[in-house]
């Protein structure tokens, strides 16, 4: 199969990765309407084609919170990345480093902060959830500092976990290794099984051995079920900002009023996000909310976005609406599941090529010049 698109990588990953882990990456909550609209709403936005302009010496470079990038596309924090492919977080971080884009490690990763730091040379970003166990939370911050992480991404839209029906049906809401269904799904993917024998990393590396009372997989599942803090509020953001002391990005903003509160909290950037359609089903797509949030706070804070990006054209549309950075989760996970580090690189190459060509067809050589004038009026 010749890989030309992110969809090609998705199909390849679906054939290789056990169903429970593939579905975990490729699902939304409840009816999945928000999950689908994150992508379909991009298609409603039309581009203005321009002709007879100089298309030489093009550049897609654009900094994100002061960090230079080959293109303003960061790898989003994703849980269980190391179950798509052995040592998945390390492989993805290496691909991002070589390509020149930021990598964001999730709290719920298989490879730990220390694992990724030991296997990379450039600083990466770390994503944090607010847990009830504040000692654990403070230790996470200290570990991210010690690893040289250059930004902290604080996720604010997971105080409680949305129900994803596929996870419930696949048994992923408990320990799947204790069920016949779980083993049945795993054993249908022999190549994946054999590859997993090459690594010792099979659990949540940032938690097991670091959180009080969590020493194995069974205690891990009960701990995580209890630890997401429903009492999370803006005072917690201030507490974390003070202890982190570095660049802070707030993830999960979908409303103008919350964007204004994020500015007041002193964040360096916000991510317009609905958690990939995995939390509030029926919430609007992120691309539909981006313009209004940029208009409200874009002159005070750097606005990024995630959700639904499947091509370089999607990236350009987000930049045209005022985003200073974008994030891809599922596209790089498809690549990782399909072909490991090489697949992540392929995903980045696909998006970069599409972004570069689309920018040229819109009559620009510098991505920094892209704005709403490059979109067809009435379509955004």
Image (cartoon, helix red, strand yellow):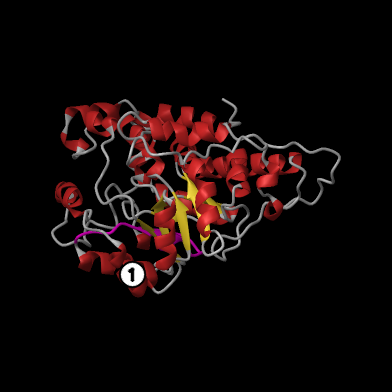
Query: Dot 1, crowdedness within 10 Å: few (<14), some or many (≥20)?
Result: some
Badge 1 marks a residue whose secondary structure is: helix
Q: Is residue 130 magenta?
A: yes
Q: Which residues are magenta?
A: 116-132
Task: Look at the image and tell me in which quarter the C terminus lies.
Answer: top right
Q: Quick check: can you spot residue 96?
A: no
Residue 290, x across and y down, in percent? 51, 47
For the point 57% across and 44% down, the residue is 348
Task: Look at the image and tell me in which quarter the N terminus lies.
Answer: top right
Is residue 242 or residue 89 the one in the foreground? Answer: 242
- Residue 132 image-quadrant placement: bottom left
Is residue 295 or residue 161 the one in the foreground? Answer: 295
Relative to 102, say whether 17 is above or below.
above
Residue 21, x across and y down, in percent? 33, 36
Relative to 180, say whether 195 is above or below.
below
Is residue 89 or residue 328 the one in the foreground? Answer: 328
For the point 43% across and 37% down, the residue is 337
Q: Quick check: can you spot residue 318?
A: yes
Residue 81, x across and y down, in percent? 38, 45
How many labels, in total? 1
Q: Is residue 248 magenta?
A: no
**Left or right placement of residue 31 versus residue 15 in this view:** left
The residue that label 1 is drawn on is: 238
Residue 88, x across and y down, in percent? 41, 47
């Amino acid at each position: 199969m010749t890989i030309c698109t992110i969809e090609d990588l998705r199909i390849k990953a679906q054939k290789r990765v056990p169903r429970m882990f593939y579905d975990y990456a490729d699902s939304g909550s409840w009816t999945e309407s928000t999950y689908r609209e994150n992508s379909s709403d991009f298609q409603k936005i039309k581009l203005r084609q321009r002709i007879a302009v100089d298309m030489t010496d093009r550049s897609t470079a654009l900094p994100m919170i002061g960090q230079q990038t080959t293109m303003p596309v960061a790898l989003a924090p994703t849980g269980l990345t190391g179950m798509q492919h052995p040592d998945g977080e390390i492989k993805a971080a290496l691909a991002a480093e070589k390509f020149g884009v930021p990598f964001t490690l999730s709290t719920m990763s298989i490879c730990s902060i220390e694992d990724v730091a030991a296997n990379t040379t450039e600083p990466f970003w770390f994503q944090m959830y607010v847990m009830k166990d504040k000692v654990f939370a403070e230790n996470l911050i200290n570990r991210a500092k010690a690893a040289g992480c250059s930004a902290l991404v604080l996720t604010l839209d997971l105080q409680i976990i949305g129900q994803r029906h596929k996870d419930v049906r696949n048994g992923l809401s408990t320990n799947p290794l204790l069920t016949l269904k779980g083993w049945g799904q795993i054993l249908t993917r022999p190549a994946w099984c054999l590859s997993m024998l090459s690594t010792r990393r099979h659990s949540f590396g940032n938690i097991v051995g670091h959180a009080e009372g969590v020493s194995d997989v069974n205690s891990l599942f009960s701990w995580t079920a209890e630890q997401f803090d429903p009492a999370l509020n803006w005072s917690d953001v201030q507490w974390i900002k003070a202890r982190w002391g570095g660049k802070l990005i707030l993830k999960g903003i979908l409303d103008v009023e919350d964007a204004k509160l994020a500015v007041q909290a002193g964040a360096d950037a916000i991510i317009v996000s609905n958690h990939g359609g995995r939390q509030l089903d029926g919430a609007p797509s992120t691309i539909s909310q981006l313009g209004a949030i940029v208009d409200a706070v874009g002159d005070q804070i750097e606005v990024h976005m995630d959700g639904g990006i499947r091509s370089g054209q999607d990236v350009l549309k987000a930049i045209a609406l005022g985003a200073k950075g974008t994030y891809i989760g599922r596209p790089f996970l498809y690549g990782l599941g399909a072909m490991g580090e090489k697949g992540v690189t392929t995903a980045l190459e696909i998006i970069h090529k599409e972004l570069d060509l689309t920018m040229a067809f819109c009559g620009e050589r510098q991505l920094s010049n892209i704005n709403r004038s490059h979109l067809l009026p009435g379509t955004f």
